[in-house]
């Protein structure tokens, strides 16, 4: 038994949680068990909540605030310890969210009509942000190997005819859960540099490497990578504080940094709200024990989901991720259309998961299960799915 209780069930309905209180609007009915959007059903760790309470209680004025002296050292020490990544303090800037950061980079570094390369199936705001800003999305779909692991399609990247633009990388990959090796990243960096594609490496899931694996920060793999990239990080996923925006960027190249950070400064986007830095420092200074326990619990949940599907749900396979708490459920053997699959999950099982096609048509037949929840919740989601699939199979006979 560890120090923290991840089995605790916490009612989120009625708190304004996106995960529970937007079901009618997003899934067409309110009575679903939620295992979709990527936040955790675990309590945000006590040392982070306490740091926020301490600040609010220690002084009644919540005024404009300056960056605490320990903000950059806390990030630098954390990244060095976890990822062997040496960051210079000048390379860091707060950003008001990673998706917003991607929108900003799109606006600062490209013009309407320019290319934004994405590798679907991938975190859907990559596509949406580019499209909504009038950029030209270039899809280079991932290849799927025999073990259902995604691989970067280097040949298609090589064949791109582009005048430059951006390449958006999910590292580790959401929703496929792949962690990229230094060799894979270095090859991507070389091609991107040659094709004049500035790489945005979204590393929000980096601190949740599973099964003893190690995350490789894109910037560290080569000179091509360091001189042609912007990396986005955050403690938000790992420590369950996405409601407190805590993201930051890391840019080693001075030319890119001057352009991006100059624009952030001109618009005051690099200035954080009062509680962001406090939460980040608490997470990075006090969070290692919690992070390790949380990862062990998530790993057990993943094993549980794998076993449960194999033993009880014919036609549904849980694909093991290298990192984070999002598990691809491969439902392709059920042979359902997109509408039928959604109906099975929403109206049959009454569970809310992210549907694979959100991430691109390459996600057809897959559903994304969030296992950052008490075991009892994961079990209930899968048990409802088992019943719905069994009914489906009976009806087919
Ligand atoms: C890959 C990835 N990037 C970014 C985000 C969201 O980041 P933010 O809330 O800072 O915009 C998520 C959330 O699910 C994500 O999975």
Image (cartoon, rainbow, N blue to C red):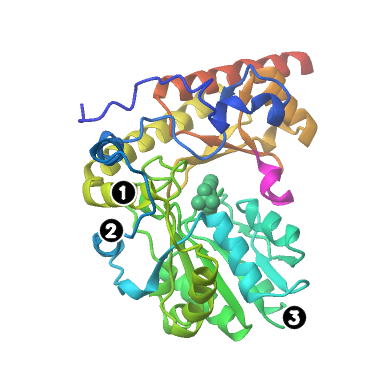
Q: Earlier in the sequence, mark 2 or mark 3?
A: 2
Between discs 1 and 2, the one toward the N terminus? 2
SS class, disc 3: loop
**Quadrant where the N terminus is found in the figure:** top left
Q: Position of residue 79 (x, y in %)?
A: 30, 62
Taking the image as shown, residue 188 lies to the left or right of residue 215, namely right
Q: Which mark is residue 278?
A: 1
Q: Is residue 44 visible?
A: yes
**Which residue corresponds to mark 3?**
161
Which residue is found at the position 61% from the left and 15% from the top? 387
Q: Which residues are magenta?
A: 355-363
- At x 61%, y 20%, the residue is 32
Disc 1 + disc 3, Cβ < 8 Å: no
What residue did someone put label 2 on?
Answer: 68
- Which image quadrant: the C terminus? top right
The reply to whether callout 1 and callout 2 are in contact (CB within 8 Å) is: yes
Earlier residue among tags 1 and 3: 3
In the image shown, does 269 or 129 lie closer to the viewer? Answer: 269
Location of residue 396 (image quadrant): top right
Q: Are marks 2 and 3 in contact (CB under 8 Å)?
A: no
How many discs appear? 3
Residue 12 drawn at (x, y percent):
48, 23
Our reading of the magenta stretch's main secondary structure is: helix
Tell me where residue 215 appears, x and y as whole percent. Answer: 37, 59
């Amino acid at each position: 038994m560890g120090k923290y209780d991840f089995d605790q069930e916490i009612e989120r309905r009625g708190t304004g949680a996106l995960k529970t209180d937007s079901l009618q609007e997003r899934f067409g009915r309110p009575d679903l068990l939620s295992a979709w959007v990527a936040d955790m059903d675990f309590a945000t760790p006590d040392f982070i909540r306490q740091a926020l309470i301490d600040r609010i209680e220690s002084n009644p004025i919540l005024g404009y605030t300056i960056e605490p002296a320990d903000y950059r050292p806390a990030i630098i020490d954390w990244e060095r310890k976890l990822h062997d990544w040496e960051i210079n303090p000048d390379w860091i800037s707060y950003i008001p969210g990673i998706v917003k950061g991607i929108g900003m980079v799109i606006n600062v570094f490209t013009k309407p009509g320019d290319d934004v390369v994405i590798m679907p199936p991938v975190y859907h705001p990559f596509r949406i942000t580019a499209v909504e800003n009038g950029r030209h999305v270039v899809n280079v779909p991932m290849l799927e190997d025999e073990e259902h692991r995604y691989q970067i399609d280097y040949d298609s990247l090589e064949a791109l005819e582009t005048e430059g633009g951006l390449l958006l990388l999910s590292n580790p990959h959401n929703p496929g859960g792949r962690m990229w090796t230094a060799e894979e990243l270095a090859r991507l960096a070389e091609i991107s540099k040659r094709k004049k594609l500035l790489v945005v490496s979204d590393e929000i899931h980096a601190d949740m490497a599973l099964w003893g694996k190690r995350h490789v920060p894109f910037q560290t793999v080569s000179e091509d990578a360091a001189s042609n990239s912007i990396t986005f990080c955050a403690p938000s996923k790992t420590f369950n504080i996405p409601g407190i925006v805590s993201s930051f960027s890391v840019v080693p190249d001075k030319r890119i940094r001057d352009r991006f950070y100059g624009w952030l400064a001109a618009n005051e986007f690099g200035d954080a709200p009062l509680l962001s830095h406090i939460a980040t420092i608490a997470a990075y200074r006090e969070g290692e024990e919690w992070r390790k326990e949380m990862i062990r619990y998530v790993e057990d949940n993943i094993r549980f989901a794998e076993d449960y599907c194999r033993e009880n749900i014919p036609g549904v396979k849980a694909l093991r991720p290298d990192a984070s708490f999002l598990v691809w459920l491969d439902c392709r053997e059920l042979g359902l259309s997109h509408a039928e699959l959604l109906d099975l999950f929403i109206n049959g099982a009454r569970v809310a998961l992210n549907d694979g096609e959100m991430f691109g048509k390459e996600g057809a037949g897959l559903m994304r299960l969030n296992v950052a929840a008490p075991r009892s919740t994961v079990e209930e989601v899968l048990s409802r799915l088992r019943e719905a699939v069994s009914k489906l199979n009976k009806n087919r006979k």
